[in-house]
Each structure stands twice: as structure tokens, then as C-alpha cells.
Amino acid sequence: MSGSTLLFPVVGRPVTQVQAPAAFNPLFAACGVDAIVVPLEMPSEGVVRRVRDLLDSASDGGILVTVPYKKALLEAADRL
């Protein structure tokens, strides 16, 4: 990781079941992509605002969403 690493958080609650880091991080490394996928558990209160704040970061490469926020976070998305 470096100062230019792109972050791809997996937002949900819970996130213990998330498989994306194990699938994507080795792929990013093998392809020389400076990015990392990390699970990020968030409480439901203010989740849309928090995700919008993450999306405003220059370090954000995109957001993966899991249960129970898939429907709620549609309003935070620029595109699906």
C-alpha cells in the first residue's frame, strides 16, 4: 500500500461473511493495481451520509455493498 492506494470498502453489517478481499486483493496484486478491498462494518444510523463521505475521498475507488444496506445505499450511488 502507498499514499496512492485506492480503497474499495465493502460496507455492510455484519461483514464477517465478506469474501471480496480474498478474491480481489490477490487479483489486484497480480495485475499490479495499487488497490485494496477491506470490509467496513457500519451502523445503520447515518450510513448514507458516511458512504457519501467515503465516495468524496480521492482515495476511494468505489464501494461494494452487502446486507442490509444494498437498497438503502442506492440513493448514494452515482451509477450502479
Image: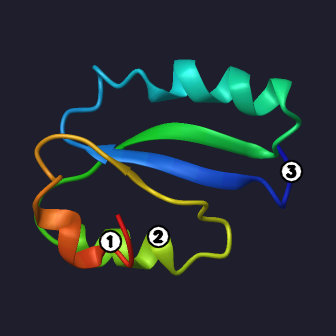
- Quadrant (top left, top right, bottom left, bottom right) of the N terminus: top right
Closer to the chain start, of discs 3 and 2, is 3
Q: Mark 3–mark 2 contact, CB under 8 Å? A: no
Position of 30 compared to 41: left or right? right
Residue farthest front in this picture: 80
Q: Please tell me which residue is depicted at 20% across the width and 33% down the height of the picture.
A: 14
Q: Which mark is residue 2?
A: 3
Q: Please tell me which residue is depicted at 35% across the width and 25% down the height of the picture.
A: 18
Label 2 amino acid?
A: Leu
Q: Which residue is mark 2?
A: 54
Q: Please tell me which residue is depicted at 67% across the width and 66% down the height of the picture.
A: 59
Task: Point out residue 58 in the picture as x, y percentages from the top left corner.
Answer: 67, 75
Q: Which residue is mark 1?
A: 50
Q: For marks 1 and 2, give the CA distance.
A: 6 Å
Label 1 amino acid?
A: Arg
Position of 76 compared to 62: left or right? left
